[in-house]
Image: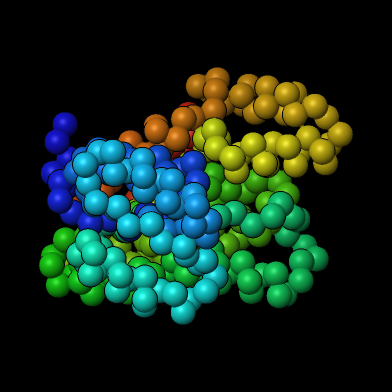
Amino acid sequence: MDLGIKGRTALVLGAGGGLGGAVARALAAEGVNVALGDIDAKAARASADAVETAGVKAVPLAWDLADLSLIGPHIGTIARELGPVEILVNITGGPPPTPAAGQDAAQWTRQFQAMVLSVIAITDAVLPEMRSRKWGRIITSTSSGVIAPIPNLGLSNTLRSSLVGWSKTLSREVARDGVTANIVVPGRIATGRITFLDEARAKRENRPVEAVVAESNASIPAGRYGRPEEFAAAVAFLASEQASYITGSVIRIDGGQIPSV
């Protein structure tokens, strides 16, 4: 299927990681020029190199999302080198595993700025061009914890959930301008983040990590962790011309893991 987005410009945040890198490659395969933001400059560059093999333009950006002062300069660089952002994929790093209770206020503030306020501010920076052009896609990745809170991920469950309400509200404000806003909810996708969480759980419970992984697989109807490419394919479709009537939605990419309707 031709997704109808060849020649458009995308900004993928967290593009040096497993999910973001896969999304950047999926969009590039559709002919989209991609700006790749990541706190790790080397990882962003490596993802950009992979993207360029598809014959599109790629701009890697060292981007600490907690530093809001970077937004203006980076958006300006993208506009000069690729054109205005038409597809925005918001993927942020996850906070450390913690219970919900007893966390320092400074920790909540720091993570809120990196995981929530940054996403809102970056979206606000690119939204005027989308609305004026009557076309735009805003896709924000969260976690299965926004539907079924995950034990010992108190910061993540709380902060990512706020993005769901924000995205739904935004979707109603911009729909008549041809701009869609959707949430994607990855389940257990085989990335470095999931490996980290499995290892942390194994250490916390004094169990072999293999036992933790086996238990996780058993809890997923599909019987396995997802591949980053499977997650990226869903995101690429939401960015497509064909997905113009999908907005305000929460799309699960979880192999059936989340038990609720």
Task: Answer with left or right where residue 111 lies relative to residue 39.
Answer: right
- Left/right placement of residue 112 relative to residue 8 reads right
Observer-nearest of 57 and 15 = 57
Task: Tell which of 186 and 164 is nearer to you.
Answer: 186
Q: What x and y, as percent, mark residue 4? A: 13, 44
Residue appearing at x 68%, y 51% in the figure: 153
Is residue 15 or residue 136 the one in the foreground? 15
Residue occupying image coordinates x 32% and y 43%: 51
Residue 182, located in which quarter of the rendered image? bottom left
- Pinpoint residue 109: horizontal percent, then vertical percent: 64, 74
Instruction: Please report the residue visible at 44 percent of the width from the left and 52 percent of the height from the top.
Output: 44
The answer to whether residue 232 shows anywhere in this view is yes
Count of residue discs: 0
**In which quadrant of the rendered image does the N terminus lie?**
top left
Q: How is the image coloured?
A: rainbow
Quarter-wise, where is residue 223 in the image? top right
Q: Classify 60 as above or below 186.
A: below
Percent x, y of residue 226: 49, 30
- Where residue 126 sits: x, y (%)? 29, 70
Residue 148 visible from this viewpoint = no
| Residue in the picture at 76% in, 71% down | 104
Q: Residue furthest right?
A: 206
Q: Is residue 78 above or below residue 20?
A: below
Placement of 108 over or under 82, stated as above or below: below
